[in-house]
Image (cartoon, helix red, strand yellow):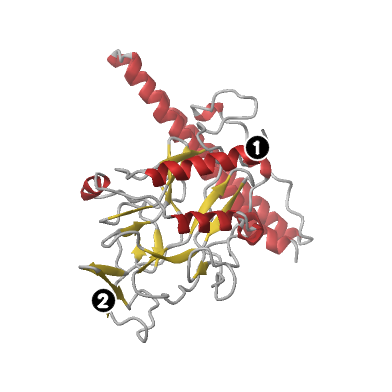
Amino acid sequence: MRKSVVIALFSCLLALVVLSAPTNSSAQIRISVAFGPPALPIYVQPICPGEGYIWTPGYWAWDEDGDDYYWVPGTWVLAPEVGYLWTPPWWGWEGGVYLFHVGFWGPHVGWYGGINYGFGYFGEGFVGGRWDHDRFFYNREVTNINIVNIHNVYNEHIEYRDNHVSYNGGPGGIEARPRPEYERYDHERHLGPIPAQEQHIQEARGNRELRASVNQGRPPIAATPRAGEFRGNVEAAREAGAPYRAPERGARGGQPGGNMARPENNSRPPVHPNELPKYERPAPPSTGNPNLDRKYQQQQEKMYARQDQQRQQLQQRQEQDHQRMQQRNANDAQRQQMEQRHQQQTQQLQQRHTQQQQQMQQRQAPREHK
């Protein structure tokens, strides 16, 4: 069976599972990807098409078949039931991998990782509107409403900070945790994405221009007035949320249902810093300007020296953990938990160092080509 057919069947089965019955918590798909999703692009919200429509913000999804992130445009969707609100999907770093949490409908907006999607979804809860019996009222301060067609509005000023980071935890991620009441929300009756949303996702997945490697984090269709309407009055991203450079294909490896990303030789992932491979240092800069090249070389050497020091410090802390375990005569379960924690620490350090190296190369590359 062809790979594309297998992926399509997996997607359909997943959609049936989500849609067939209410759920008590947001579903998770384990994704083994060596890099996180791009920053959230900056775009304008389309005008609400009519009463009862709820805004569902755009987000980055992963396409295993295309081996790439792709943008699912924000859009307006009719609520499946009176009183129901949308909890957006989100990415979170856990155990050395990125986990994708599927969005859902419910009586309360659940936890979505502290991600600032904008337009009322500023990291926690939703302030873009509220239900009053069987009518939905819109907050004009944060949503794009035409008061000629919609009269059930109110004004509530909201203070928030711009932040375009698209995932929780891990290197560079949002550092936020849910409040206790979200555990109660998890036990409420939930509904998965409605058919119009599923169609919207499939339309986005099949659009090559929405792939991150093509649009560099600035999708040409960032938002649509209705789900599935990808032509006509759509909103393009004004700019990317942050500079984006697609990693080499060898650094990828998304795998639904997979475990932590492993080296190609199928050996176990490194647990301690002294098991990490040596850094592959780039060739010395060559801009034609000796002074500039020397400056770049010094910056690189300083960064690598700092990273080597951080590896050594983490190695020493972990060795101290081993010594304490021996002194306490810890059992196998305690030792295993310690090793799992060490593995996560090591992978987070490696991920952070890789991002630092990429950022330095990005800062130097534009000048080298002038």
Q: Is residue 77 visible?
A: yes
User: Hey, which quadrant is residue 107 in on the image?
Assistant: bottom left
Residue 254 shows in the view: no
Residue 111 x, y percent position in the rendering = 32, 51
Q: How busy is the neighbourhood of tag 1: few (under 14 within 10 Å), some, or many (20 plus)?
A: few
Quarter of the N terminus within the rendering: top right
Residue 68 point in image, percent of width and height: 61, 49
Say the numbered circle drawn on residue 186.
none
Q: Residue furthest right?
A: 288
Q: To which quarter of the image does residue 202 belong?
A: bottom right
Q: Nearer the viewer, residue 349 or 144?
A: 144
Q: Which residue is mark 2?
A: 156
Q: Which residue is mark 1?
A: 3
Query: Foreground: 130 or 254?
Result: 130
The disc, 1 or 2, on the residue closer to the chain's N-terminal end is 1
Q: What secondary structure is marked by label 1?
A: helix
- Identified at 40% across, 77% down, the residue is 144
Count the marks: how many?
Answer: 2
Instruction: Tell me, yes or no, whether the two marked residues, 1 and 2, touch with CB atoms within 8 Å.
Output: no
Q: Is residue 86 left or right of residue 41?
A: left
